[in-house]
Image: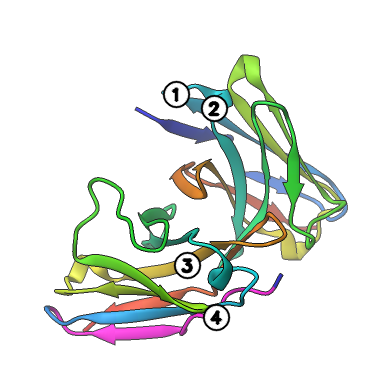
Amino acid sequence: QVQLVQSGAEVKKPGASVKVSCKASGYSFTNYAIHWVRQAPGQRLEWMGWINTGNGDTKYSQRFQGRVTITRDTSASTAYMELSSLRSEDTAIYYCTREHRIRLDPWGQGTLVTVSS
Amino acid sequence: QSALTQPASVSGSPGQSITISCTGTSSDVGGYTYVSWYQQHPGKAPKLIIYDVSDRPSGVSNRFSGSKSGNTASLTISGLQAEDEADYYCNSYTSSTTLVFGGGTKLTVV
């Protein structure tokens, strides 16, 4: 079945970077885009950006422009999201999700990133 | 890009119907048929329940329906059940070729 499995929880210090992975299985990886969405504790879903897994093109939310980088490794059917210059407000669950015609389905299980000194 | 506007909370009794609104602009909700809705239970990842304004993925109950008028999309849940208690988020494609989510609505089945 189609599945997205994300890497485990991370604890980072302010100013550091974090890289979260998202391994896809059960479908042809390069046929669907991957989006990243985050959710701070008790807060709403927030769209961060997406990658065309076929050609590597990316688009980011202006809110994260300059701090987020989304990449992919087609040989490993894996997408990555790296967020730099972390601050406490970046503490959140980060989700990857597969997109087809603007439908986001399925979603990964989420990765908790905690930013704390 | 500002979040789409949703009511913070709605409630209903088992068997009743409720509607959640999602208001944007002509640059997102009003300009495209790419409006989707997601259900999120506590501690779980979101689940797609409506796409392209009013279509349901296979396996999603027909008690869930969607519609749109102008810059406002709506999600209606009929025959409320206890298991429907969750957070609901709308999402739209935008003219900037990005996506935007709503603020989320907490549904309580009383």
Label 1 belongs to which residue? A27
Label 2 belongs to which residue? A31
Q: Is residue A83 left or right of residue B26?
A: right
The answer to whether the residue labelled 4 contacts the one labelled 2, judged by CB atoms less than 8 Å apart, is: no
In the rendered structure, the residue with mark 3 lies on which chain? B
Mark 3 or 4, nearer chain start: 4
Amino acid at pointer 4: Thr
Label 3 belongs to which residue? B90
Residue B50: % across, % down: 36, 59
Label 4 belongs to which residue? B5
Q: CA distance from mark 2 to mark 1?
A: 8 Å
Q: CA distance from mark 4 to mark 2?
A: 32 Å
Query: Which marked residue is nearer to the observer: mark 2 or mark 3?
Result: 2
Look at 41% across and 73% down and name the residue there. Answer: B68
Q: Which residues are magenta?
A: B2-14
Picture quadrant of residue B51: bottom left
Amino acid at pointer 2: Asn
The answer to whether the residue labelled 4 contacts the one labelled 1, judged by CB atoms less than 8 Å apart, is: no
